[in-house]
Image: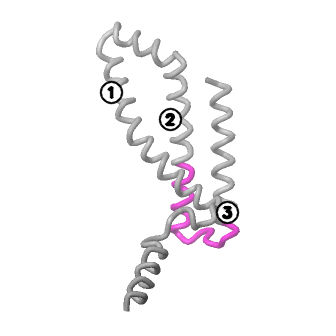
Amino acid sequence: MKSSSQDKQVLLNAAPISPRLSIYRWRLTMLASIMHRASGVFLVLVIPAAFWLLLTMAHDNTNYMYALVWLQGPIGTFLLWLTSVALFYHFSNGVRFLCLDAGWGESRTMMKTSAKLVLASTLFMAILLAIKI
């Protein structure tokens, strides 16, 4: 009797309760989906701060100058670049997801191709913005 309860306990400990990311093979479409969520969370956190910064700049000339100096510094420039890249990626991948929801490009090859297109265009835009900024 003890052996059967021990066997059950071993089986319960061995089987995962829910699938974990470590058992999946990483695919480009999976990465695109996770990055879409991450960019959305980043934008939700950054956009209110950007509005606050704009309101602060509109308050008076002194605050405007402080904000302008901060934005032209290395941290401000990096955050502007990162926000722009995240916004571009989130928008273009959102259009991709809308097309998939409409039934366009649901084959595996089209899903991979569209994910590659979104990632490549975001990389191009990131490099272009880094050069311009």
| Relative to 115, 52 lies left or right | left
| Relative to 125, 91 lies left or right | left
Asked whether the beta carbons under mark 1 and mark 3 sit within 8 Å of each other, the answer is no
Residue 14's place in the image compared with 131, above or below, is below
Q: Which residue is mark 2?
A: 83
Helix, strand or loop under label 2: helix
Residue located farthest toward the front when viewing the structure as drawn:
2
Residue type of the residue flagged with mark 3: Lys
Q: Which residue is mark 1?
A: 52
Range of magenta residues: 91-110
Name the image quarter holding residue 26: bottom right
Name the image quarter holding residue 55: top left
Residue at coordinates 52% horizontally, 48% vertically from top-left?
91
Name the image quarter holding residue 47: top left
Can you tell which mark lies on residue 112? 3
Q: Is residue 108 magenta?
A: yes
